[in-house]
Amino acid sequence: MIQAHSKSYFHQFWDGLQINGSSDSFSIELLPSLGATINHSNKLKKFVISPYDPRYRFWELFLIVLVIYSAWICPFELAFLRDMPSKLMLVENIVNSFFAMDIVLTFFVAYVNRKTHLLVDNRKRIAVRYLSTWFIFDVCSTAPFQPIILLFTHKVNDLSFKILDMLRLWRLHQVSTLFARLEKDIRFNYFWTRCSKLISVTLFAVHCAGCFNYMLADRYPYPENTWIGAVMPTFRSESLWTRYVTALYWSITTLTTTGYGDLHAENPREMLFDIFYMLFNLGFTAYLIGNMTNLVVHGTSRTQIFRDSIHAASEFAARNQLPVNIKQQMLSHFCLQFKTEGYNQQVLLNGLPKGIRSNIAYSLFLPIMRRAYLFHGVSNSFIAELVMEVQVEYFPPKEDIILQNEGAADVYLIVSGAVNMITTINGNEQVYVKVTNGDMFGELGALCNMPQPFTFRTAELSQLLRISRTRLTEAIQNHREDYNILMNNLFQNGKLINLPGSLEELIKIGRQKFPDFHPTKVVSADYAEIDDIGVIRDGDHIFFLQM
């Protein structure tokens, strides 16, 4: 079970899947904000779609295919199809209808707030955000201009109207988003992903330039005085394939600055277009060379370092024959570290003056620590001394935070997520209890200076506040009166008990602590039965058994 859960989380890092109906795992893109309270429910409001839903991701991939078709057909129609075939117009309307459906669907798709990194499922806020950003562009790129023009003017093949269809190229931003996501996906080779993007951009530039240059020749009043008419006087009667390949041939030879001289500008219009195209090629060539140099020589900085870490961790696990679950914990840790480095939250806080850090700490962490059972009734100065030193940490599922029998460690307060308290009996791990939002762990070892009685392992993506044991000890020394309050809170919460005078009284306490459990025996950690209360010492692990 541990192995499967860790592997699932590791894959979710790349898939971006956040909501799986009954799943309790979060997308790593939805890391809770510092000190955030627990409002990260997986269940969205009715009629709101998660952007990480697999079905919605499939819909996006389907639209990408249509975008690629639109990017190719728009310049081609403008240049080579003076008369739009009825079948092609039908296909265009069907494609536009899918994009119109996507516009409507976007009003029901939740989004991640860039400031808080929380998923927003309020339909009003979703609508306002969409209407104030890309809505107008999406409508203009989807509006069926040709049927509207045909209905009112009956001049569907007019050049000025055809240029309006070029607005559909706005949809290409979806392809750019797809490549940005693929570049961070370690299931795909980063080098070939970048190369595919550069090749796609190059082919699109070649296609558009060839189509535009042919359009200038086709609509020039003297066909023989054009770049293609000079070598092919009857080019308009040639097949569509021949004309298209010739246009691509001119475009690619000009882009690569080969320039054989067999196809060249023959009139001022073409000369002006060639000038702008060659100026564009200067910048485009620099872009290609710069990207290829970065790939071949420097690789990628942060992303490449992360991928190297993943590769090194995989090799380390294989070389030392580590269990699969430990390997998955290592990989999940690097994945989470990569994302939290992107937010750079702790580094940002450390770079601020102490006064500002104190104000931020009071605002974010003071209410959370006040609600923790351990700090009920302690003085404000004691809390203030601790709150300035707390550290925020993120842990992926199934990662060990504290190990059983480990020495006294730091104290952790759960802001979001859940942690399993696990004990080992006869070599078998058993979950004692699950602690969730607002609970603490590690305080027994820190305050009583004793080995940890349990292993604490995350059950899901968790945000924790870590209170240094050293800092806690210093605060107690400065506020002696609060130490008794802390210990009293431990007793009241059932974390500590005073050892009674007999086993019968100890078993009675066990029955009171566990109402649905009726223990009859007391055993030690090595399963040896305890028949005398006097053999129990401080720090011993004892277990109740029901026979």
Image (cartoon, helix red, strand yellow):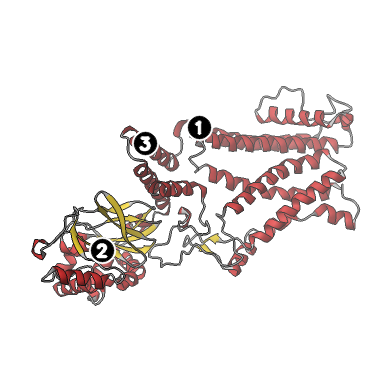
Q: Which residue is mark 3?
A: 312
Q: Separation of disc 3 and disc 2 at Cα?
A: 48 Å
Q: Amino acid at mark 1?
A: Thr
Q: Separation of disc 1 and disc 3 at Cα?
A: 25 Å
Mark 1 or 3 closer to N-term? 1
Position of 501 with respect to 423 (left or right) is left
The image shows residue 104 at horizontal and vertical percentages of 68, 61
Tell me the mark number nearer the camera, choosing from 3 and 2: 2
Q: Which residue is mark 1?
A: 293
CB atoms at circles 3 and 2 under 8 Å apart? Answer: no
Q: Nearer the viewer, residue 519 or 408?
A: 519
Q: Which residue is mark 2?
A: 546
* x 64%, y 58%: residue: 134
Q: Nearer the viewer, residue 6 or 209?
A: 6
Query: Is 344 rendered above or below residue 208?
Result: below
Position of 282 with respect to 250 (left or right) is left
Query: Is 78 rendered above or below residue 440?
Result: above
Secondary structure state at the residue bearing disc 3: helix
The image shows residue 161 at horizontal and vertical percentages of 82, 50
Q: How many marks?
A: 3
